[in-house]
Image: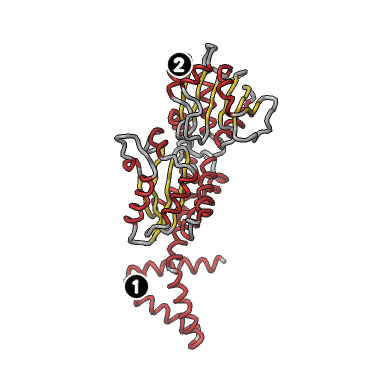
Amino acid sequence: MSIQLISVSHKTADLNIRSCFALTKEQQIKYLKDMVSGGYIEECALLSTCNRLEIYLYGKDGNQREIFSEAEKGLLRMIAFPEGVDGAEYLRFYEGEKAERHLFFVAAGLDSMVMGEDQILGQVKESWQQAMAAGTIGTYLNTCFRYAVTGAKKVKTETDLSRTPVSAATIAIKAAREYLGDLKGKKVLLIGASGKIGNSIFKNLLSEGESQIYMTSRKHCHGGKGERYLELPYSERYALLDEMDVVLSATASPHYTLTLDKVKKALATKKSRVFIDLAVPPDIDRRVQELSNTGYYNIDDFSRVADENNRKKEKEAAAAADILEDYRIQFEKWMIFQKSFHEVQSVKEKICGQAEAKGMDKALSHFFFALRESFEPGQLEMFMEALKKVEESYEEN
């Protein structure tokens, strides 16, 4: 009985491939329910972000191969890959300690493109809640996620990993500033302001106070109008385009929010512009970079800035890894004990029964005699070392 994981991420696949693995919420829930209604998978949770798709699984020992096979086949059946692309080659498989440790690192932002970024913890919580709502998560994955989230929170409070936050949103704004020289007095169009990344970009732009912000969202989530921003219907995005210096798009749309032909028709004024696409699958037709005086960046283009950030945070990352490993070991101990719960209960009942009949001293003597006879010498020595630690714990408490 162990945790298993299938993963595809920015470390194994570029944006084009990750776009293929971008499942809708409806597809995610269908996949979860299909998996636990099969034969070998007892629990399943799915984490989907712009940089990764990960499937966490739990089932009985001895069925690891079948669990991986069912989960992989179910996933690949849902995805249409371009001709000549074998989606399976981008998948990575983990089990046991490696799968657990991976989840803990992901939750704390240690496996992110931008190390220590804040959004991933919320995304891990959402995937946990989604599996709970779908009824596809049980005792083991539920507890594993709980320990991972608790460990990640401790990392945030006890290390500096996230105290100088760098995220896709902050890197996107930095890229726009570097391309144009500065953002003072510039007009910025933000498509998808109600989403998590879009909202983060909006807050960053607003706090810097340099630019005039125009934004579209599914609903008026920022009050419609402010001194430095204006919310507009999504349908008006092309009408505004010619005035804009920066265009950022971060939606969950399955199709382009901006196509090359319509962008060409909308642009009349000759000036430098930059288009920044933070969506997976992409929002902006990348061919806009063919236009004169036009910059274009997508999420994979930010890896250089992310690498610089990650190098600066290596010391904090080491401290974070130690914290997370403590929580992972706590989970491992819980899991071992949970698997043996019925045996523990049975032995307790036998000891209590003998204690009632012959007294506690004789009952415990019988218990230790049974241990001595059941163990090999090496096992018995390890048990006695553990017993010393238990004794010390009693003395401390």
Q: Residue at x 57, y 38 (%)?
A: 163
Q: Which residue is mark 2?
A: 291
Relative to residue 212, is residue 308 depicted above or below? Answer: below
Element type at mark 1: loop
Q: Earlier in the sequence, mark 1 or mark 2?
A: 2
Name the foreground residue: 127 vs 203: 127
Disc 1 crowd rating (10 Å Cα; few below 14, some 14-19, many 20+) is few
Q: Amino acid at mark 1?
A: Phe
Could you tell me if the residues under marks 1 and 2 are in contact, i.e. CB atoms within 8 Å? no
Residue furthest toward the right?
Answer: 227
Relative to residue 267, is residue 45 depicted above or below? Answer: below
Give the image location of residue 223, x and y in percent: 68, 33
Element type at mark 2: loop
Q: Residue at x 51, y 33 (%)?
A: 168
Relative to residue 369, is residue 128 depicted above or below? Answer: above
Name the foreground residue: 292 vs 382: 292
Q: How are the residues colored? A: secondary structure
Q: Which residue is mark 1?
A: 375
Left or right placement of residue 51 versus residue 88 in this view: right
Q: Residue at x 46, y 51 (%)?
A: 45
Give the image location of residue 383, x and y in percent: 40, 69
Q: Residue at x 45, y 80 (%)?
A: 350
Name the foreground residue: 174 vs 10: 10
